[in-house]
Structures are given as structure tokens and as C-alpha cells.
Amino acid sequence: MTPSKKESKKSDRPRPWLIEPPEMPHQDPKKRIQNFEEVNLGYTEDQILQEAERCMVCKNPKCVGGCPVEIEIDRFLEAVRTRDYRKAIHIIKEKNSLPAICGRVCPQETQCQAGCILSKKGNAVEIGRIERFLADWEREHGVQVPKLPKSTGHRIAIVGSGPAGLTAAGDLALLGHEVTVFESLHEPGGVLVYGIPEFRLPKAIVKAEVDYLKQLGVEFQLNAFIGQLFTFDDLFEQGYKAILLASGAGLPRFLRIPGVNLIGSYSSNEFLTRVNLMRAYQFPAYDTPIIHGKIFAVIGGGNAAMDSARTALRLGASKVYIVYRRSENEMPVRREEYHHAREEGVVFEFLTQPIELFGDDKGRVKVMRCLRNRLGEPDESGRRRPETIEGSEFEFPVDMVIFAIGASANPSVPSCTPGLECDRWGDVIVDPESLETSIAHVWAAGDITGGEGTVIAAAGEGKIAARNIHEYLQTL
């Protein structure tokens, strides 16, 4: 039997999961290592329409379940398919006040896109890149602030303006509460401004998202060090009915090896803060000097390590090494960032364990001694445990070493707050469902409750805390 024209057309269509998503336009690697401008340039309108058409419009969309902030992805993709971008961004902002940020730095490939039905056979829809386009489109065409409900009269204090604090602030403001965010630094944004480089997340994007929250009525108090300037008791006495602690993971970790205190040895936290927030790369226009080296070694395999290595290249380093104790397969970094680092010339020393740093007569780092590793059995994280190989010692010259092996919960508030229970690692202990702490009417969310995580994971916790704070306020 000869198939009908309709059947022929249907069978000739390429399967959506077999269609390669458009490549993200980006700066040429040779040019971008000479500047701090954004590497990824964003999808065009034609590209996002092409991607949205690949959506299967599932009856039970698994992508939604993979989103920590619960965006109704199927709904906003349907609006994109009809070219109603205003409606699409409104759907996103019903659940997420930070779409331009999340569209850039959220690891969609392991979250919403991992749930996409197309990923089971091939290529998931590039949900994050569409979200970024919509946020940028709205910024260019005018941000519309939703109609706010009548004020409840309840005041909430949020300590920290990172992703958890900002997300909670947006959700609570949309519910009619009066929100004040206390930030210890001179710019709002937390890790979004001090930890993520300009070439991955421009400061103008963070500022625009913060400005949107201000339009929702959120107040920001900068240079406000809670625990030193005000205690929790002080805030309650000022009329705040609830407090959310979202001060992040600000205590850097170092390897316990000889030479770690030599000049030219930094934590990634300090290095990135000086360069990103304090614009050390523009010294003396911005009065924050930083030691520059020609040969950098960055210890670690996560996003902070990749950010540090790529920043070092932009500061004029002639050689940058990533020194990682496991293999390429165990690296927790986003694959896109790893790919960009390789394109830019970062050299990777896998299965390598630093054991000592040596300095010159002025106390500056000059040589790093290492051992080679092999992989043993998986550890508690599920990754194979590295084991050093005896007799495999080797050395190479370095004049800057950056430790990017993680950070612990910021101790500034817990150390000044009697009764706030923490575990042996310094993380604030919370109820696993409500995120309330050991102090009544004080919640905690984000990295302060469990060390370094992702931006979107922190935002998801901020949303959970906001929901539970709102439920409590309704009982007053």
C-alpha cells in the first residue's frame, strides 16, 4: 500500500532526540583570553524557536520535576512556540526571580534537561539557553513588575544576598511581606558577584536581577555584618517576625601541606573575590592589587577551579595548570566550563596530588612537588578514591598556587549566635523539611547548611525556606 502524503511527511521528519541543538555562539578562544567579556553570546531568536519546537509536550513533563525552583517548563516552552515571549518570561518568574542568572550558570544538563524525555534517546531540549534568551529579551524590551498583593505588615530579615537569599526575598515579596536583605559586602549578590567571573556572569546581569527585586519592594542594607552589627535578638526587637540565614560558604579550605602559607598562595575564594568584585584586574583604577604570576597551578576540579584557571589566563599568565587528584571522569565541573578551559589553553594534570610547596629567599612560591595517583574503590561520594603511587614524585616550577578544593559554611554568624546548632563541619543544622534552625523563627538555606553547592540548589532551598516562613507568618 502506498503511504499517504501526510504519512510520508510525518515519517520523513527527523526524530526530535536526534536533532543536534544549535551550538551556543561564543567568543573566539584566542580573543576571549585577552578580555573579561562574556564568553557565551546567547542563542538567537531563530535558535530558541528551533529548540522549543523539539519539545515533545509531554503529559507528565519530567523536566519540571528536575528543576529545584519548580519552573513550569512545559508552559513556558509552549509560550515560546507561539512567540509570546512576554508570557513565557512571566511563567518563569512566577517561580524564579533570577532567570538571567540561572539561564547562564545553572547546570541544566544534570537537572531539568536530565529529566527531558529526549535525553533518554539523544539530545535534550536546551532549556537553560531558552531561559537565558527570554530573560535577556525582557531586559531589552522592558521589565514588567507584577501587581503586588496588599502588604501583610510582616517584616522578614534575610542575612546574605546570594542565590538562596535573593530567591527567598523575591518569593516573600510576591506574597506581600516586607523583606530586608542584609549583606556584609558593599555589593549585593553574594557568590554571584564575588565568586563567578565576569566572563561567565556579567555583574550587570546580577544588578538587573537585584533591581527587579527592589521593584518588588525588597530593601537591601549593604555593609551590614549580622552578628557584629546586629544580633538575631536585635533584629527581632526591631520588629522582624522571621529571619532567614543565607550567608553561604565563605570559609576556604587548604591542603595541609608544607609551604601552603608562602607568598603567592591563595584560596580561590580570595583570588576570585579580589578579581571579580573588587576589580583587581583593573588596578590601579580599582585600588585592589593582586600578585600576578606567570605560571599558575590551580588545585581542584570543580567550577571554582575552572573559574580561577581561566581568570589567571586573563591576568596574563603564560601557563596555567589544573592539578586534580582524580581522573577527568570524576571532575565535578560542568562539562561546558571544562571544554572552554581546554579551548583557552589550560593544561590538566590528572591523577596528581600536591605534597609540598617550595619558596625562594623572599618567601615566594617557586616549585610544587607532587605524587602521581591511581584510582581505587569508590568513596562516600561515589567517585573512585585516589591512592598515591610510591616513588612517583615529580616537581614543576610555579609562582602562583590557588587552592580551589571547596569551602565550609561561613562561620561569621554562627560564631556570634548562642543557641544556633551546627554540626562538626560548621554547617548550620536545620529541620530537613522546613529548614528551621534550632532557634525559633530562624531558618537557614543554601551553602550555610551544607558547604558549597550550586547556585540553583541554593535557590531551591531559598524557595523552600520562604514557603515555610510564609506558612508560619499566616499563624500570627
Image (spheres, rainbow, N blue to C red):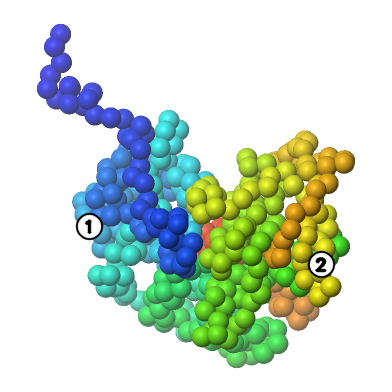
Compare marks 2 and 1 and give the one earlier in the sequence.
Answer: 1
What residue is drawn where x is 71% and y is 65%? 399
Tell me whether circle 2 and circle 1 mark residues in contact (CB < 8 Å): no
According to the picture, the residue beneath numbered tag 1 turns out to be: 84
Q: Residue at x 62, y 81 (%)?
A: 289
- Residue 144, given in percent of the width and then of the height, sits at 29, 73
* Above or below, 108 relative to 460: above
Q: Quick one: label 1, few (<14), some, or many (20+) residues within 10 Å?
A: few
Mark 1 belongs to which amino acid? Asp
Left or right relative to 104: residue 441: right
Badge 2 crowding class, 10 Å Cα cut-off, few under 14, some 14 to 19, many 20 or more, is some
Quarter of the image with the N terminus is: top left
**Hey, what amino acid is under mark 2?**
Gly
Give coordinates of residue 130: x percent, y percent.
34, 53
State whether residue 170 appears in this view: no
Residue beneath label 2, please? Answer: 359
Q: Quadrant of residue 3?
A: top left
Residue 394 versus residue 144 in the image, above or below: above
Residue 285, position as x, y percentages in the image = 51, 85
Q: Which residue is nearer to you in this view: 9 or 95? A: 9
Where's residue 8, x and y in %?
Answer: 17, 22
For label 1, the SS is loop
Residue at 21 percent across and 54 percent down: it is 83
User: In this rendering, would 76 be left or right of 13?
Assistant: right
| C-alpha separation, residue under disc 2 versus residue under disc 1 | 61 Å
Which image quarter is the C terminus in?
bottom right
Residue 420, image quadrant: bottom right
